[in-house]
Image (cartoon, rainbow, N blue to C red):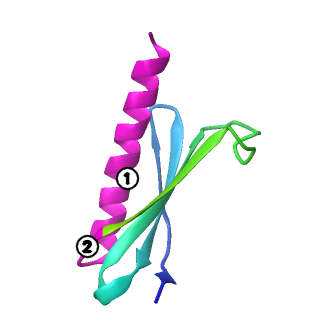
Amino acid sequence: MEMFMDTNSVEYRGFQIVVTPIKDHEDLWDFQYHISKSGDPAATSIGHSISRRQTFGGYETAAIACDAGIEVAKIEIDNHIALSAK
């Protein structure tokens, strides 16, 4: 059973992160996130944004899953910036 809840959105280092907690198996929560460049008119175009989903593990509440999704997305952004600088 998969149930979506309200999204949480934050800006981080010039990127927009949108995280949606998802109720998954055994009443635990997971998340999916979407990263796009802030202000990019092509943000929804293929190659201009990133979407990922975590379905391994699980969190007790939607809020905790959302916080975890934001942290994972921030790490991905940091990695992208570091690799782009080389």
Residue 12's place in the image compared with 60, above or below, is: above
Q: What is the x, y in percent for residue 1?
A: 46, 89
Q: Give the side of residue 12 with respect to residue 15, left or right.
A: left
Magenta range: 57-86
10 Å neighbourhood of mark 1: few (<14), some, or many (≥20)? many
User: What separation in Å lies between label 2 and label 1 (alpha carbons)?
Assistant: 14 Å
Residue 75's image quarter? Answer: top left
Q: Main secondary structure of the magenta part?
A: helix
Residue at horizontal 36 percent and vertical 64 percent from the top: 66
Question: Residue sitting at 32 percent across and 71 percent down?
Answer: 63
Pointer 2 with pointer 1, Cβ within 8 A: no
Give how far across and how far down residue 3 sits, in percent. 49, 84
Q: Is residue 60 above or below residue 12?
A: below
Task: Provide residue 7's location: percent of width, then percent of height.
Answer: 50, 67
Residue 1: give its label.
none
Identify the residue at horizontal 28%, vertical 78% (top origin). Answer: 61
What number is the disc on residue 70? 1
Instruction: Identify the mark at residue 59; answer none if there is no mark.
Output: 2
Mark 2 neighbour class, 10 Å CA radius: few under 14, some 14 to 19, many 20 or more: many
In the structure shown, which secondary structural element does the residue marked by tag 2 occupy? Answer: strand
Labels 2 and 1: the sequence-earlier one: 2
Q: Residue furthest front?
A: 56
Residue 75 located within the stretch drawn in magenta = yes
As shown in the figure, which amino acid type bears the numbered disc 1? Ile
Amino acid type, callout 2: Tyr
How many numbered marks, from 0 up? 2
Q: Position of residue 52 (x, y in %)?
A: 50, 55
Q: Quadrant of the C terminus?
A: top left
